[in-house]
Image: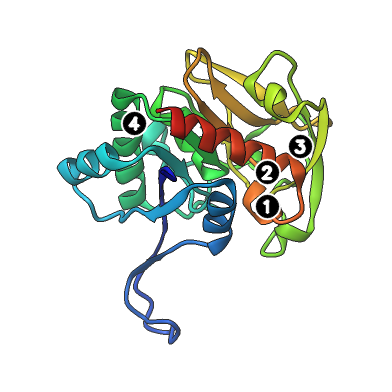
Amino acid sequence: MRPLIGMTMWVAPHEDERTYPTPYPFEFLHRAYSFMIRRAGGVPVLLPNAADAEEVRRLLGVLDGLLLTGGEDVEPCRFREDVRTDTLKPAPARDEFELQAIEYADQLGLPVLGICRGCQVLNVAHGGTLYQDLLEQREKPTENHSRGSLFYRRFHDVTIEKGTRLHEIIGLDRISVSTAHHQAVKDLASGWQVNALSPDDRVIEGIELSGTRFVLALQWHPEVMAENDMNTRKLAAAFITACRRG
């Protein structure tokens, strides 16, 4: 049986000036995520942010794995901070849904893969903090990791830490990745380890839960590289294998 992989979605608010696909609120997800999961052998299942706590629990109970996708910023109140920048684009309903989903996934022992925002919300869910905006808050010189709407055409290197699950999966010390983020992990949650770094400015580009359970998160976007990138295929295959094993 192909494992069922729950995938979180972006939230688009009401905008009177928007004519397509609708001015009304809607949820959506780049199809590249589904392509990556299907190619690796999983069945993508879209998860609605409107679900309440009991519905979230029921949804997670029938899934084999959870994919936390990229998207909007995590609200600073979720990691016990006031807003310190005007660059934030929060999604409170999504924060609520994903934090509950992570809690229930932990209870069930589900494999979890986090991408971009997914990396950030996993760290926050387990007690870590974020830079609200790297360029504004980080003291060390920091390159611009936010590459704009065409980030899937732009890349930078990351170094992969030896002895981590990510290094075991990919088998390389350094790779080129597609990136687009202005938030990032600041204080790492207890029980987690860094698995990837931006080599020039040492910004955290990946984290994973210590131990045997597959809970791994990347700050970059492997899904937009899924068609041609062998590292992305290795990562997706490892995630789906973990989901099959339960």
Considering only order in the chain, which callout, 3 or 2, is on the residue closer to the N terminus?
A: 3
- Residue under circle 3? 142
What label does residue 105 carry, if any? Answer: 4
Amino acid type, label 3: Thr
Considering only order in the chain, which callout, 4 or 1, is on the residue closer to the N terminus?
A: 4
Q: Nearer the viewer, mark 4 or mark 2?
A: 2
Amino acid type, label 2: Arg
What is the x, y in percent for residue 223? 62, 51
Q: Is residue 135 visible?
A: no
Amino acid type, label 1: Ala
Residue at 53% across / 62% down in the picture? 30
Residue at 75% across / 16% down in the picture? 162
- Residue under circle 2? 233
Q: Tell me the colour scheme of the image.
A: rainbow
Q: Nearer the viewer, residue 207 or 223?
A: 223
Q: Quadrant of residue 121?
A: top left
Considering only order in the chain, which callout, 3 or 1, is on the residue closer to the N terminus?
A: 3
**Separation (CA) of disc 4 from disc 2:** 24 Å
